[in-house]
Image (cartoon, grey):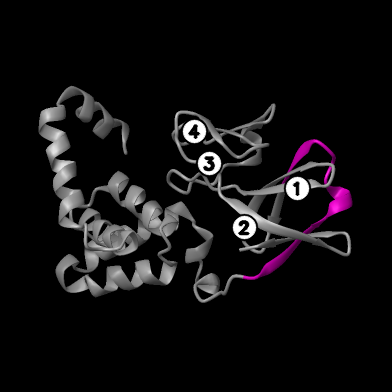
Amino acid sequence: MSDALEYLVKARPDAIKPYFTFLRESGKHLDPRTRDLISVITKVAVQTENGFRQYLTRALRNGASANEVLDALLMAFPVLGLAKVVWAVEILLDMDIPEFHPELLDAREEWHDVIAVADLPDDEITYCEADERSLFVYRLGDDIRVYDSRCPHQVTNIPHLALQEGRLTCPKHNWVFDIKSGECVEKGNRPLTHFKHKVENGRLHVFW
């Protein structure tokens, strides 16, 4: 929820809360992914950028693929028109989400060779880049944790320079994460995306 909506919920609860109840009830027979894709289209229809970013992120989190998002936009073309579809795609390009890169649209989830374990200092965070994706890797002895560099709020890519004393701060809305646990400790309420990993022949492999 945006800061503006949170304010309205607090300032005018009698007016705003019934609206959210209506939205929940009107979509209660839809699975979350479908409901979110419909919300994405409605935000494009009224060209609400923050809403589009919010529901796009939610749709991806609930299992929608990049191809499904693009298909939803194109299926709504007769109603939206070219200008609004282009407007949405320009925001997608600005967000620079790896899954939307043309060469990755049809990619299947698989293991990726990232780095030699020997190159991961103990009890430190290492920033890595592999196959179009940026990662933060924390190692403590044999315990290794791998996190996406993308903020779970609006998929903003958090640069490695945002890491200070084990805390990672998203530059867009100041969500703060404990990089050792991945938990959000300030502002937001969702943890960093955690990736499965394995070690083979002394190298770290990550699954996405």
Q: Is residue 170 left or right of residue 173?
A: right
**Of marks 2 and 3, which one's residue comes earlier in the chain?**
2
Q: Amino acid at mark 2?
A: Arg
Please give the residue where the numbered disc 4 appears in the rendered image.
175
Local secondary structure at mark 2? strand
User: Which numbered tag is attached to residue 144?
Assistant: 1
Q: Which residues are magenta?
A: 110-127
**Of marks 4 and 1, which one's residue comes earlier in the chain?**
1
Is the residue 17 above or below the residue 89 in the image? above
Is the residue 28 above or below the residue 104 in the image? above
User: Which numbered tag is attached to residue 191?
Assistant: 3
Local secondary structure at mark 1? strand
**Of marks 3 and 1, which one's residue comes earlier in the chain?**
1
Residue 127: image quadrant is: top right
Quarter occupied by the N terminus: top left
> What's the CA distance linking mark 3 and mark 4?
10 Å
| Residue extending farthest left | 15
> What's the CA distance linking mark 2 and mark 4?
20 Å
Residue 73: image quadrant is: bottom left
Quarter occupied by the C terminus: bottom right
Please give the residue where the numbered disc 2 appears in the rendered image.
133
Q: Is residue 150 left or right of residue 143?
A: left
Front tag of 2 and 4: 4
